[in-house]
Image (cartoon, helix red, strand yellow):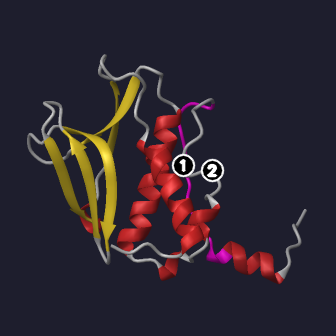
Amino acid sequence: MTEIRTTAEAQEEAALPRAKVVHTAADAPETAEVKPLPPELTREPPEDKSPAQWAYERVLLYIQNFEEQLKEDEEVVLGLTGGEAGVLQIEGIGFFDPDILTFYGTDEYGARTQLIQHVNQLNVMLIAQPKLPEDEAPRRIGFRLARALEEEGHSGKQDR
């Protein structure tokens, strides 16, 4: 049977970004591609966003989804690509229009680490790593990032 949609619904559907995922297991956990976009990300149309802002927002969704699936004794780290770069415990993420993303954190030795990445070269590997025993509770960056987006939406665009 054909579904009947209003003109407004068709226009809204055409403006929304498309995403798709296929998993080998039928019971695979829900991923960022199939979840509805949070309202904070739909306030501004994708075509009005810089590549850096749009990449930043989508990476945020992937990190938050990954963290939702972690065990209580795990934290997310970012696997750095290229050479012997190691991993980065994510403590912050930023973007600099039009095309730069920055990941802030510490490496596996506790050294302050920053990855500056052009959106055309973006490769992010999220890794579930046991949290350090001295940490009382796992740190969840994805939820802090989502909160920051919500706050931006209420106060307008956030500048430097």
Q: Quadrant of residue 122?
A: bottom left
**Looking at the image, residue 36 lies above or below residue 28:** below
Q: Are marks 1 and 2 in contact (CB under 8 Å)?
A: yes
Q: Which mark is residue 35?
A: 2
Main SS class of the magenta portion in the image: loop
Verify whether residue 24 appears in magenta. Answer: yes
**For numbered disc 2, what is the local secondary structure?**
loop
Q: CA distance from mark 1 to mark 2?
A: 5 Å
Q: Residue at x 41, y 28 (%)?
A: 138
Q: Nearer the viewer, residue 78 or 81?
A: 78
| Amino acid type assigned to the residue bearing label 1 in the image | Ala
Residue 17 in sight: no
Q: Among all residues in the image, which is located at the extreme left?
A: 84
Tell me the crowding category of disc 1: few under 14, some 14 to 19, or many 20 or more residues within 10 angstroms, Cα based: many
Looking at the rendered image, the quarter that the C terminus falls into is: bottom left
Tell me the crowding category of disc 2: few under 14, some 14 to 19, or many 20 or more residues within 10 angstroms, Cα based: few
On the image, the x and y values in percent for residue 155 come to 55, 72
**Looking at the image, residue 14 lies above or below residue 38:** below
Looking at the rendered image, the quarter that the N terminus falls into is: bottom right
Q: Which residues are magenta?
A: 14-26
Q: Nearer the viewer, residue 147 or 3?
A: 147
On the image, the x and y values in percent for residue 9 come to 79, 75
Q: Residue at x 40, y 69 (%)?
A: 53
**In this picture, residue 125 sits left or right of residue 17:** left
**In this picture, residue 129 sits left or right of residue 1:** left
| Amino acid type assigned to the residue bearing label 2 in the image | Lys
On the image, the x and y values in percent for residue 30 come to 60, 39
Q: Which mark is residue 32?
A: 1
Residue 48 in sight: yes
Verify whether residue 94 appears in magenta. Answer: no
